[in-house]
Image (spheres, grey):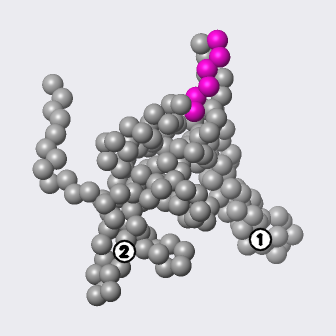
Amino acid sequence: MTEYNLDFSSHETIELPVKGPNNQEYMLREADGGAVARYNSAKAACIRVANGKVSGVAGQGETEILLVSLCLFAVNVEDDGSKIVAKTHVTEALVRSLPGPMVAKLFETSQKISEIDQDDDLVSLRKQRAKLDEQIRQIEEEQVKNEPSSTGDGLESPATSVPEETYSI
């Protein structure tokens, strides 16, 4: 029989300090149960079904804004220098006003610290594949630049390329 450890008495909520535009301070917290439920419901609402089959996905970007807003809390700095984390999360409107790269990083980090969407959905896997393909391309270009064009004896040096593999998803 499988044993499960369900003792969470020593669990500490993960909180990460964030410095935003204009030096505004925030705290990124792992999602609580309510936030996870809202995020998962929003993701499910993005799935389009026709004739009993999934026909597409729409509005998935909104789920990123939602998760970040549910995990991000403003930090107020008092006159004496003490910092107080707001009791409620920031609004989706505030997240929309942040720079895109910041939102992307906050979304990715929110997913990781909250242990949701463990990069096993099709969209996430395709993004991972695209990033890996780009990294491979850059490394191969760098190898070509750094490779001597010949061995000095008139013979071409052997190529040291990694064979490409094809993965189906």
Residue 76's disc is 2
Q: Is residue 47 magenta?
A: yes
Q: Which one is in front, 107 or 148?
A: 107
Give the image location of residue 151, x and y in percent: 79, 71
Q: Is residue 40 left or right of residue 96?
A: left
Using a 10 Å C-alpha cutoff, classify the residue at mark 1 as few (fewer than 14 neighbours), some (14 to 19) or many (20 or more).
Answer: few
Q: Name, please, the residue furthest toward the bottom.
A: 80
Residue 12 sits in which quadrant? bottom left
Classify mark 2: helix, strand or loop. Answer: strand
Amino acid type shown at disc 1:
Lys
Quadrant occupied by the N terminus:
top left
Residue sitting at x 17%, y 35%: 4
Residue sitting at x 55%, y 56%: 93
Q: Please, is residue 28 above or below residue 57 in the view? A: below
Classify mark 1: helix, strand or loop. Answer: helix
Residue 99 sits in which quadrant? bottom right
Residue sitting at x 68%, y 45%: 164
Give the image location of residue 156, x and y in percent: 82, 64
Q: Magenta region's main secondary structure?
A: strand
Give the image location of residue 128, x and y in percent: 58, 48
Residue 70's disc is none
Q: Is residue 121 left or right of residue 18?
A: right
Q: Is residue 37 left or right of residue 143?
A: left
Residue bounds of the magenta highlight: 46-51
Q: Which residue is mark 1?
A: 145
Q: Please, is residue 30 above or below residue 16 in the view? A: above
Between discs 1 and 2, the one toward the N terminus: 2
Q: Name, please, the residue furthest toward the front.
A: 79
Q: Is residue 124 magenta?
A: no
Nearer the observer: mark 1 or 2; the answer is: 2
Give the image location of residue 137, x and y in percent: 71, 57
Q: Which one is in front, 66 or 127?
A: 66
